[in-house]
Amino acid sequence: MAANSIRKRQTLRGGEQRRYQSSDSKSSSGSEIKASSDGSNKSSGSGKLSTKEANTEASSAGGTRRSLTFAIGGVLTLLGVAGYTFFRQPTVDIHSAATPSTSILSSPTQTALESVSTKRIEAKKKLDGLPSKERREEAKKLGMLTEEEVDAILHAKENSWHLAPSSSNALGLRVDTNQVSSNDPIEDYLAWSPLGIFSEVEADKSPSVPRYMFSVFDGHAGYMCAEQLSLRLAPMLNESLDVVSKLVNQESSTSEIGKELVSTVKQLKRDSGIEWDQIPLALTATFIRMDYELVHGALAEFRKLQKMSTIDKLLGPAVSGSCGIVAVVDTEAKEVVVGNTGDSRALLGVRLKDGRWKAVRLSEDQTGSNQKELERMMREHPGEPSVISRGRVLGALMPTRAFGDCRYKWPLEAQQDLFPVLYSRGHRYATTPSNYNTPPYVTAKP
């Protein structure tokens, strides 16, 4: 896509769509902040954060809000944690860097990381090949990391950079990222991209744009699904925004992907019976279409080609899965729209007049523990009491919404045909869940 779009492996988990809007104030004492849910919440079962509720929270916490930060981040097992934060930065120099800073680690930090690496190699040698019970016992005997080593791990992948304002009315942004992985290779990716740019030439002519996409894809059952999302979702969202804009202006889309998105967008409007704002509509259509391509489009392509040499590349992303959370930031409208599928979280951090910070959740975990999701699953699969078992989809998958995870979406015939082959090639989640009667059980709709 654009020259200054990037991607990184990163952790997080995702849910519904929320809008956050800020009305900028010329006074340095602060700004008026509004939060509201968009129409898509009616179809996704997400909660609402109204302007009145937000203002009440601010008042009870000690006064007028002065500045804000938005963050999306998540936690994996053990120490798998990632943060992704951007700050309002109205005074950013127009020539500020639009790419992450490359910090050179200090000698003590580098030395500590080398020590950690050595310890990991030694631990792997001791534990590899041991039976699970013996492995657990031996793991208890491993030495603890020092404070310096822990500090080095926590700071090793920090990045920070500025995105210059696109006009005098736009906000500049400071973006901060960090990552601590809990597995190797890590299954999670971060991706950000400017929106509204369709070529390298446009990127060179317009280095600053009003809209950006920030996203984190929390993979599970392998890295392949999250990796594809990090590569393909931003260009599709770009196309979706263009399609929605053309539909509003009664123009036609000429690209193939544009025509497919038009069909998805029109179906969404018919099914919901509500008026959509453009960004939520584009986000929702992108999530649905992206998942269709990963799960069903790839299956159709493999059956068409019938080449075993393509099976891993085409169907690997379908077997693995990923939660996803995406924020579209409009620096001129001073608006943030969040699309979330899975159990990631988005938070709005607001600094109050007395200097304290207030955290406001902008997403809702989509799991079997969410009563609304439980009711939806029971409604969509009547007569199947095990659809949510032990708080999980068919007793296995924690999020009720996710990309990929074809074992909860493919017809049984396709699973019986292809899963034995995929499993033999190392895709260990290519197995059919128990009580698999009425797929699909999982959706990527935010």
Image (spheres, helix red, strand yellow):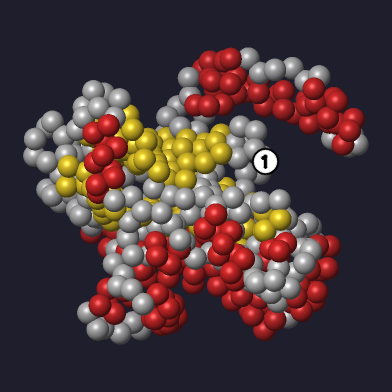
Q: Is residue 320 visible?
A: no
Q: Is residue 371 visible?
A: yes
Q: Residue 203: image x %, image y %?
A: 29, 58
Residue type at mark 1 is Asp
Q: Residue 367: image x %, image y %?
A: 58, 53
Depth check, front residue: 247 or 316:
247
Give the residue pinned by disc 1: 184
The reply, left or right, for residue 420 in relation to residue 100 is: right
Q: Is residue 431 above or below residue 79?
A: below
Picture quarter containing residue 103?
top left
Secondary-structure class at tag 1: loop
Q: Quadrant of the N terminus?
A: bottom left
Q: Residue 30: image x %, image y %?
A: 16, 34
Which residue sits at x=15%, y=44%? 24
Which residue sits at x=52%, y=58%? 372
Which residue sits at x=25%, y=27%? 62
The reply, left or right, for residue 49 in relation to residue 315 is: left
Q: Is residue 223 above or below residue 436?
A: above
Depth check, front residue: 380 or 332:
380
